[in-house]
Image: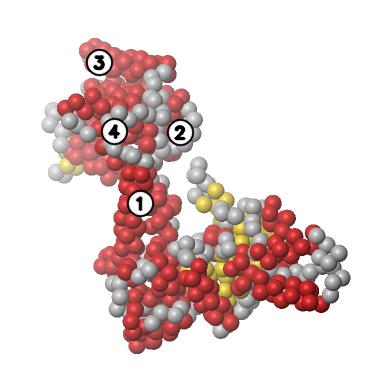
Amino acid sequence: MLRDITLGQYYPIDSPIHRLDPRAKILLTVGFIVAVFLVGSLPGYIPIVLFLVLVVRLSRLPVNMMLRSLKPLRILLVFTFVLNMFFGTGERELFRLGFIVVKEDGLMNAVRFSARLIFLVVGSSVLTLTTAPVTLTDGLERLASPLKRIGFPAHEMAMMMTIALRFIPTLTEEADKIMKAQSARGADFSTGNLKARAKAMIPLLVPLFVSAFRRAGDLAMAMEARCYHGGEGRTRLHVLRYRRGDAVAFGAMALLIAVVVLQGRLQ
Amino acid sequence: MPITVENLTHTYQQGSPFQATAIRDISLTIRDGEALALIGHTGSGKSTLAQHLNALLTPTSGRVLLDGRDINNREVSKRAVRFEVGLVFQYPEHQLFEETVARDIGFGPRNMGLSEAEVDARVRAAMDMVGLSYETMKDKSPFELSGGQMRRVALAGVLAMRPRILVLDEPTAGLDPRARDYLLSDIARLHSDGTTVVMISHSMDDVARLATRVAVLEQGRLVMEGAPNDVFMQVDRLGAMGLDVPAASRLVHGLRARGIDLPDCCLLDELADLLEKLLKGGTGHAS
């Protein structure tokens, strides 16, 4: 049942992309997004596509896994495409069907914005597919730690995220077990109208909340018993270090941005 | 023959990098009126097997037959199967959700579509079966009870559906000795009243006390099956799988190694009688 839902997208294999420092990957993702937005024309997407293909090949991720990340976006993509296509403001008309007018610039914009959306989603899903959630929060904490000086609780935020992520599989399993236990007593979660289904969730949600609170209490107790007192003066087991691969990746990103900018200038 | 399991294999998350085969090619028949114990190491597939018995899990391959009908067949109502084969999960008290004990126990019967009068009658009977007083307990919140009481409320919640076959996943885990004793007597009583019982347990003494037959799982395969006396006397083989045997079996095994001739036995009371007879009977073995 619920076990089949993949939570957190991490795809646990080994690849040069998986091995990159999480901080590097976060910064590179930001860099990639910037590059995508810098592109001003359709041919400008060629370096972006090449870069993405290279990264996906290096990451050894199955291509259908990447495409699956686009699935929730279908409707938004169709909207973006259709809206842009019909609301061109340019001179040249491509065709006209009654009150529907498609202009050249409208079509170009439709393709551009849809492509931009696709690249953004695929690019950032490389980050979540190749980085374990806990490593990701670790990277975020380190990146945000300079903000501690102005009072931003970077460690606490990261700890909360880590705990939340850590408990997703536990609670999923728990929910699965409770669902099965109630199904064994004849509960029906999948048929009936909206009201009936909402009501059917009560036997699942009440025990799940009880269990979540119990687990939270236990965890707080266990953390206190081990003298947890927040981030101050805390050292790490796994210290993040930039390696050569990260330098190469930063170099590649710099190159990509340079190419995109140059291409923009030349036109 | 109420339940026949044929070449059952189950793989979790097939096709993903997390795929894991929990049980492989298991064939097993559960006979009417027997008390079958499933034993095995953690992760040996006992719970996975149990969840196939009432169609909570669908086999990756193989079949599960209830009275000769494949319970995963589209034409067979899974809900109807679940009312026939009651499954009590591990730590079943974690599934309690209603405001009162009586309403929680009545959840199953109400799902069966019974009249309120019938539901009420079944709740009374089920509470009686697990030794809870209907009058004093029915209006309490299940969350204010002790662990042992909660466990019995949860058991009653399944019993109220009057299943022919009762499957229990580690029914005594985490209970104190007294609550455990009560619960085992409840199960023994149900069994002697004609309910077919399938019980998963890590406590070999519980198994020795209740089971009429024992099946041993190791790494998803059925490796041994037989009467408790026969299975438990294979102390070394079970030991190699990391499994314990009842205290009595261990004692018989040790005494035999010292040349004392004793019949197979896995119950302490029985063994005490045997030893008493042996000691009174003669001095032949003493040297």
Residue type indicated by callout 2: Leu
Most foreground residue, B233 or B45: B233
Residue type at mark 1? Asp
Instruction: Name the mark on residue B106.
Output: none
Would you say the residues marked 2 and 4 are in contact, meaning their CB atoms lie under 8 Å apart?
no
**Disc with the residue nearer the chain's start (2 vs 4):** 2
Between discs 4 and 1, the one toward the N terminus: 1
Provide the secondary structure element on which disc 3 rests: helix
- Compared across the picture, whether B236 is left or right of A143 comes to right
* Residue type at tag 3: Val
Check contact, mark 3 vs mark 4: CB within 8 A: no
Question: According to the image, label 1 marks what residue?
Answer: A218
**How dense is the environment of label 4, judged by Cα within 10 Å: few (below 14), some, or many (20 and up)?**
few
Which residue is painted at 44% across and 37% down in the image?
A11
Q: Nearer the viewer, mark 2 or mark 1?
A: 1
Q: Position of residue A211 (x, y in %)?
A: 35, 58
Disc 4: which chain? A
Give the Cα separation between the discs numbered 2 and 4. Answer: 35 Å
Q: Are marks 1 and 3 in contact (CB under 8 Å)?
A: no
Q: Secondary structure at mark 2?
A: loop
Q: Quadrant of the C terminus of chain B?
A: bottom right
Mark number displayed over residue A261: 3
The structure residue drawn at horizontal position 38% and vertical position 24%, both measured from the top left corner, is A240
Both marks 4 and 1 on one chain: yes
Q: Please give the label number shown on residue A61.
A: 2
Above/below status of B14 relative to A129: below
Q: Quadrant of residue A200?
A: bottom left
Kind of residue sitting beneath label 4? Gly
